[in-house]
Image (cartoon, grey):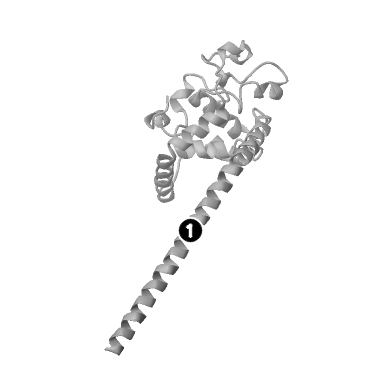
Amino acid sequence: MARGCLQGVKFLMFAFNLLFWFFVMLLLVLLLEATVTTLFFACTDQIDRYAQRDLKKGLHLYGTPGNVGLTNAWSIIQTDFRCCGVSNYTDWFEVYNATRVPDSCCLEFSEGCGLHAPGTWWKAPCYETVKMWLQENLLAVGIFGLCTALVQDSAPTLDAPAPGPSASPANTEHRAGGGRQVLAMWAGLGVGGAFHTHVFSRAALPPAGVIHGWGWG
């Protein structure tokens, strides 16, 4: 009888210890999640400011020799997302030292339309527009990127000519709309964008309308 009671006490002590450490670990996980969440929201504004500053520096590489990829990427982003500049279209004024924007900012494309009045340009900021789109389509972007990476890893890719610096209506039929391309372009538009020049000047663009197939436009 005493032996049975002793075994019962040992079992209860074991169960108590198990529950105790379970709740300790659970508490630590919750504290870690709370800390990470707090740090994330505390750093979000700082990250946004740093990213926008880097992208604005990258604007000065637009149209310069050796930066074909970055130029194409900005033209595609502004045309497909109907936006202009990082924060707004005035970001380009400092780049050109004049009141003008790239032709890819125009509501209706025509040669030299970037010299017209601001009323003929897209007003939406590209940073917030692309950021919002990526947040809304994060899962689809990840799946598309993974599948594309697997396909490209098992099959050779063919070179295709890059679009011109100005994205005309004809060019928009070959716009890079895939989520993977959007991520890669956005990552390469800052001061380090020259790294992506070779990629975008040689990369074969996906079929038009991929972005629109995910709910854009």
Find disc 1 in the rendering and name its residue: 29
Rate crowding at label 1 as few (under 14), some (14 to 19) or many (20 or more) other CA atoms within 10 Å: few
Q: Where does the image place residue 210, in percent across and percent down from the top left?
A: 40, 32
Q: Where does the image place residue 171, in percent across and percent down from the top left?
A: 48, 23
Q: Where does the image place residue 142, in percent across and percent down from the top left?
A: 43, 44
Q: Quadrant of the C terminus?
A: top left
Q: Does 22 appear above or below 79? A: below
Q: Is residue 113 visible?
A: yes
Q: Where does the image place residue 69, in percent across and percent down from the top left?
A: 58, 34
Q: Is residue 76 left or right of residue 142?
A: right
Quarter-wise, where is residue 75 in the image? top right
Q: Does 209 appear above or below 19? A: above
Amino acid type indicated by mark 1: Val
Q: Does 97 appear above or below 77? A: above
Q: Nearer the viewer, residue 17 or 55?
A: 17
Q: Nearer the viewer, residue 99 or 159?
A: 99
Residue at the outermost right position: 97
Residue plotted at (48% across, 55% down): 30
Residue plotted at (52% across, 56% down): 32
Q: Nearer the viewer, residue 34 or 57?
A: 34
Q: SS class of the residue under badge 1?
A: helix
